[in-house]
Each structure stands twice: as structure tokens, then as C-alpha cells.
Image: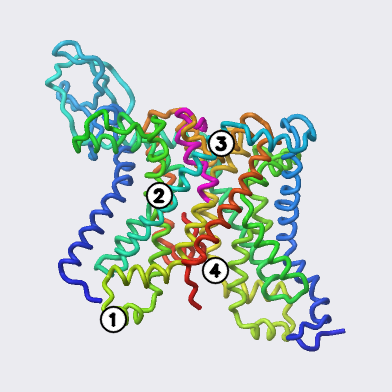
Amino acid sequence: MKLRTWQIWLATAALAGLSVIFAVPFMWMLSTSLKVDEKIQTEHLNLIPRATFIVHNGETLRVRPLQARGDMQEVQVYRDNRPAEKLMVRRTDLRDGFYLNTANYTEALRRAQFIAVTDRWPFVRGYLANTLIICVLTVTGTLLSCSLAAYGLACVEWRGRELLLWVMLSTMMLPGQVTMIPLFMTFRKLGWINTILPLVVPSFLGNAFFIFLLRQFYRSIPRDLIEAARIDGCGELGIWARIMLPLSRPALAVVALFTFIGSWNDFLRPLIYLMEESKYTMAIGLASFQGQYGGDWGQMMAMSLLMTVPIIVLFFFTQKTFIQGVKLAGIKG
Amino acid sequence: MTGTDRRTGLRGSFSNRWPVGVAFCLPLITGLLGLTAYPVLASLYYSMTDYPVFDRPVWIGLANYRELLSDPRVWISLWNTAYVAIFAVPLGMVAGLLLALLLNLKIRGMAFYRTMFFLPSIVPLIASCVLWGQILNAQKGLLNELLRLAGVPEPWIPGWLSSVFWAKPGLILMSLWGCGGGMVLYLAALQDVPQELYESAALDGAGAWRRLWHISLPMISPVLLFTGVMGLIGSVQYFEQAYVLTGGTGRPNDATLFYALNLFNTAFAEYRLGYASAMAWVMFVVILLATWGVMRLSSRYVYYHS
């Protein structure tokens, strides 16, 4: 089916227009994260971050307008992003100019304790560090437990494995809300509340969907390979480690990627299990920040961007695996 | 006794290998027992008890379920959830499908456009909630400022998250931004449709519309059904957006009190674990019924080619 020229133009115009619509929220997030608060409050539609300046004694100063008195305007002067002296100036002397307020980022980072400067190990504390620790442990646990179970289900013949597979798959129907409360009580009895254990330990006990995915992959690997290794005297653990793991690298990459993203974005479980702010992950840190400083759009957008950029970077570096995973799973982000 | 014929599955070859199989599946079996079987049974038991966190559960039979039937907030939250499921799921599917059809025209720059449509769907949910909290702000939000710029008179400007009427449409709008996840699936399915089908249909004089209706849609109908069912299950569990954007209160006036949010508040704010467990079981039944209903209704329209 050849498209006519006008049809191509029409489709291109539609695609370009839609791309802009999909991109606007991103641009808005970036732009707002670089704005000074008074401009966020007054210039609602401006995409270019700006601030107010005056020239005072030959020095250009960034100011924030306070109260107006007749022709005069009281302004707060900012030096190095910190409030300094206040001045009375003529209103006509105020000038608006391009200004990137990176203070939103430093402030968001500081408040979130991403970087505790006094620490000897600056990244050991804070939301980002907490999230990364949970992500790494969860990915490790999932890869380990799922590839082992997939091997047991796909490459070892034993009675009962069909039953186990069937039971495992049927648990996927169960919404997390059903098990949420008893699990919370169990973890409370174990004294695991306010630790990362309830978030990490379950990943070492398998994940039905990923096990199924890996099992399908393992079944596509020729049986002869495994039989030959067995005849050569290779143990089952050896076959798993030396044959199956290297051969299933593409499938493991999908599992690792989506476990990482799932863990990075996880909200409900950290919300239930982490009580102290020092234990918070990025997701609940951001949500509680929204609760406390709801009006400070600049800083919140800065924090949202800090949470989003790693995922987008990850997407661009692993595009093939990523799209493969989305298609395999229908997992949306 | 060792195995003789693997195809007939003789006892020997199977039974002496089960310790190996079980050993590999030990983490999985532990997980199924500890993280699923026990909690499911416990939850069923809790649902028939009065269980304030710091006290023992007291057996009350089906009283929780009876109370659920007459609890107005349960019905409100069910209605809100159904609203989102009824509108957001089909709209998201249609939007994703339209994008996929546009991309499938194989216009130059298709990879770029596909990335642009896909990226919003991978933004962490909490970050996109914060962003849309600004966009949907009634006074200073981007969307309303654009509407004002377009000349919409002030009384017609929607209040979005602060209005009982507009709160849910606002949340649906936000979910549409993420329709690129479904789009990728539809596009992949469209690209798998054999070209001969289109060519022979074109020879028979079928126009673009009929090719879409009689070839493309039936061929990708299993994927449509899959995303529909997953979207439905997801929307029954709709939680984060409402929790973040309304501070977990379901404001304004319970307009964003969704079922999962109501359940969470019952369990972790009111500490009524028994009642919340009963709510969870009702949710499970609703998911099963809805899935069954969709499968039933769609069975006549979904085409499986194999």
C-alpha cells in the first residue's frame, strides 16, 4: 500500500504534533525545576526560566520583589542563592532576564539527604543510597532464585514439577492486597518493620512471572547440551552455572532490568514498611516531600527529575532489552 | 531401578531425580508457602475477625462482609474505581492503538516518534504524579493556563483535582499520557500481521477502513484483550496516583477515594485489619468476576491464529 504524498504529509504533521503534546509535560518539568519560586507563582505560562534583576552600584543583583510602595519597590537581594540585604528601588529599575535557578536542585538534594556532606561515605545515607541498596539486593535475589527455580522446572525431570508450575502460575492472579496484611503482621513479629528486609528478602524466594519467563527460555535450549554435560559428569549446579546462565543472558537481562525498575518505582511496600525518614526510598521521599512542601513546585520538579532521569538513561542504554521486555511482559514501566 | 524410556515417563527416571528438582525449587517453594499460602489462609481468617493491630483477632464470622454491604464509603470507592476502569482503560487502549496505527504507516522518523510516545510510560509513577499535580492545579496549573490562553471563559475552566466533578477526568488525562506502553505492544502485533493479507484484500477492493476493521483489528485482538484485562486488573488496584495527589484523603469529598486507597487507609490508618482483609477478598472476587466477564464477552471477537 503506497501512501500518497498528501497522506504522508498529513501523517507526519499528526505525528509531529502529537510528539510535541507528549513532550510538553517533560519540558514543563525541566523548566519549572529551574525557575525561581516567585516566577512559578506569577509567570505561569513561561517555558524559559527567568528571574528579576537590578543594577545596584554597578553590580547586577538577582532580587525577589517584595512589597510595592508607590513607585518604589522593596526587593530581597540574593547573593550565592542566599537571601542577603533588602533594598528600596524604583520599580522601573527592575529587569527580567534569563536565569537558571540551580538552587532547586542543590536544595532538593540537601533536603533529601542524597548527599550528607559531613559523612565519610557520602552515598551511604539518604534516599538515593537507600533505593540503590534495595534495588541491587532485589535484583540479585530475583536473578538467583528465579534462574534456579526455572532450571528445576525446565531442565530437571521430576514428578510434581507440573503441579508446582501450575500452583505458581495460579498465584499470579492474586492481588497483592490479599497477602499484604498477614505479611505485614508476620514481618512485624519478626521485628523487620523499618528495615529493608521485607522489601528485599521476598525477592530471594522467587517471582512467578520471571520464573515462567526464564523457564520458557530454558526450554528452548537444546536438551542434548544438558545431556552431554551430564554424561561428562557435570553436576546439576555446574550445568546451571556454566551452561544455562551464560546462554540465558538475554532473558536474565530482561529480568534484571525490570526488577530494577520495579524496585526503583515501588511505592506501596516501602510506604508500609519504612517508618523513619532516614530509611526512605526516593519514591516515598518524594511523596512525603510533596506532602510537606506541596507548594514548592521548583524543588519538587527537581526531585521528580532526579528520580526520572536514571530510568530514561537506563532506557536509552538498554533499548533493545527494554522493548523486548515490554513485549514479553506487557509490563508498562 | 533406573529410567528406561523417557517418553513413557517411567517411574525410575522420575522418582530418583525429584530431590534435585526440589532442591532447585526450594526458594520458590518456601516463597509459595511463606509469602502466599500462609498469608492467603491468614487473610481469610482475619477477614472473619475483629482485629485491631495491637490486640488479638476476635472471631466474628461474616460480620465484616455484612458491614461491607452497608458501608457507604465502600460503595463510593467502588464507584470511583469503576469510573476509572470504565473510562481510563478503553481510552488508553484507543489512544495507544491510534498511535500504533500512525506509526505503522512507516513514515520517516518513526523510531523517533515511537520513543517520544513511549517515554512518558516509563516515568516513575510518583514523579509523574508530582508533575501532573502542577499541570492539573486549578489556579496556576499549566493546563488551565493554556485553556485561559485559548480563550476559555473562567466559569468553564475545570477545577481538576480540586473539583468533585473533574478530579477523576484529571486522573484519567494523566493516565493517557502513559498510553505508550500499550502502543509498543500494538505496534509489535501490527508489524507481525502478514502483508499478503493486506495485499489480497486491496486486490479485492477493500479500502483502508475495511482493511483496518477486518484485518488489522482481528489480527491483533489477542493483544488488545491482554492489555484490556491487565489494564482492568491494574485499575481495580488503582492507588498511588490518588494517594500522592490527594494526600491519601480521597479529597475532594471522597471523589478520589478509590477502593485500594480505602483499603489501605482502613488497614494502616484506622488499624482495622479484619475489615481491611475482608475488603481485600472482595477486591479479589471483583477482579476474578471482571476478568471472567471480559473473557466471556470478548471470546466471540478475539481471533487466535496459530
- The front one of B294 and A290 is B294
Identify which amino acid the numbered label 2 is placed on: Val
Q: Secondary structure at mark 3?
A: helix
Considering only vertical position in the picture, is A147 above or below B250?
A: below
Q: Is there CB contact under 8 Å for labels 3 and 2?
A: no
Q: Secondary structure at mark 4?
A: helix
* CA gap, disc 3 and disc 2: 40 Å
Image depth: mark 1 or mark 4 in front: 1
- Judge left or right: residue A14 versus residue B96: left
For mark 3, does the 10 Å Cα neighbourhood hold few (<14), some (14 to 19), or many (20 or more) residues? Answer: some
Q: Which mark is residue A309?
A: 2
Identify which amino acid the numbered label 1 is placed on: Asp
The chain holding disc 4 is A
Q: Secondary structure at mark 1?
A: loop
The chain holding disc 1 is B
Q: Residue at the spot x=14%, y=24% of the render?
A: A58
- The front one of A183 and A107 is A183
For mark 2, does the 10 Å Cα neighbourhood hold few (<14), some (14 to 19), or many (20 or more) residues? Answer: few
Image depth: mark 2 or mark 1 in front: 1
Image depth: mark 3 or mark 4 in front: 3
* CA gap, disc 2 and disc 1: 50 Å
Which numbered disc flags the more N-terminal residue, 4 or 2? 4
Q: Residue at the spot x=51%, y=30% of the render?
A: B249
Q: Are marks 2 and 1 on the same chain?
A: no
Image depth: mark 4 or mark 2 in front: 4
Q: Position of residue A222 (x, y in %)?
A: 61, 83
Q: Residue furthest right?
A: B1
The chain holding disc 2 is A
Residue under circle 4? A251
Residue under circle 3? B75
Is A172 part of what is drawn in magenta? no
From which residue to which does the magenta span run? B234-253
